[in-house]
């Protein structure tokens, strides 16, 4: 998993609440078993018209959000089914950070396991970031070491992340990596049981 220490990027506003995992990555695209290749289908029903052309009215299709790597959304982001494909699609599209007032629990956990940083901010802070992102091309820096969001205009927003999750992202460790750190102890335990 890629390390996450500090990330600067353009903010894309998704001014919608209750964005469920079927909207993030529709079920017809869940046939793949690898974690890559899902970005092209992210928000598929919103991004594309029935003709297959890009929907010019969808937020992420606006030219000012091209290359955005930070997504700001409303309450209950990632609700619905527990598919891990949702953070896979967000990551494959290029998003490293998702900010919202609240997240569905399973989606929130899956983000950390896949190198995406979900940040809970209060509604007023989300409103501020949403307004700035909707007004012009807006870039921020998310610093996980300091748990701080900053911009070129002097913004300084602290955020909280559980320490164990923070450390895993800083070091780029997924569940398998954490288990492998205990390999010597596991081998010792297995050897003692076999004796």
Image (cartoon, rainbow, N blue to C red):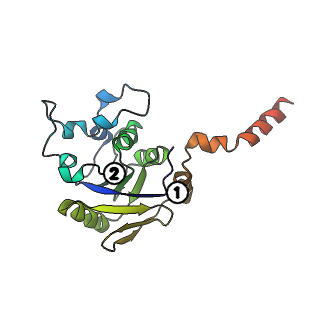
Q: Secondary structure at mark 1?
A: helix
Q: Nearer the viewer, residue 2 or 79?
A: 2
Write down the residue under mark 1: 166
Name the residue carrying label 2.
Answer: 69
Quadrant placement of the C terminus: top right
Relative to residue 142, is residue 16 depicted above or below? above
Q: Earlier in the sequence, mark 1 or mark 2?
A: 2
Please give the name of the residue rendered at 34% of the width and 56% of the height, measured from the top-left corner.
9
The residue located at (18%, 50%) in the rendering is 63
Which of these two is toward me, 47 or 27?
47
Spatial separation of the CA atoms under disc 1 and disc 2: 19 Å
User: Horizontal and vertical percent for residue 193?
Assistant: 81, 33
The answer to whether residue 113 of the structure is visible from this angle is yes
- In the shown orientation, is residue 138 left or right of residue 150? left
Residue at 76 percent across and 36 percent down: it is: 187
Please state which of residues 57 and 3 is positioned toward the viewer in this rendering.
3
Density class for disc 2 (Cα within 10 Å; few <14, some 14-19, many ≥20) is: many
Residue sticking out furthest to the bottom: 154
Give the quarter of the image for residue 49: top left
Q: Residue at x 29, y 33 (%)?
A: 26
Residue 150 placement: quadrant: bottom left
Tell me the element at label 2: loop
């Amino acid at each position: 998993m890629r390390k996450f220490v500090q990330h600067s990027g353009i903010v894309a506003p998704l001014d919608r609440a209750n964005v469920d995992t079927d909207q993030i990555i529709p079920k017809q695209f869940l046939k793949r078993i690898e974690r890559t290749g899902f970005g092209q289908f992210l928000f598929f029903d919103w991004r594309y018209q029935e003709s297959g052309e890009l929907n010019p009215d969808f937020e992420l299709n606006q030219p000012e959000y091209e290359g955005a790597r930070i997504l700001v959304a409303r309450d209950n982001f990632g609700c619905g089914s527990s598919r891990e494909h949702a953070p896979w699609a967000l990551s494959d599209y290029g998003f490293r950070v998702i900010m919202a007032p609240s997240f569905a629990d399973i989606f929130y956990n899956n983000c950390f396991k896949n190198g995406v940083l979900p940040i809970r901010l209060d509604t007023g802070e989300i409103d501020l970031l949403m307004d700035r992102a909707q007004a012009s091309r807006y870039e921020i820096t998310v610093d996980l070491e300091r748990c701080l969001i900053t911009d070129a205009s002097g913004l300084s927003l602290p955020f909280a992340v559980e320490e164990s999750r923070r450390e895993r992202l800083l070091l780029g460790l997924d569940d398998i990596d954490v288990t492998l750190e205990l390999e010597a102890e596991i081998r010792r335990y297995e050897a003692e049981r076999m004796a």
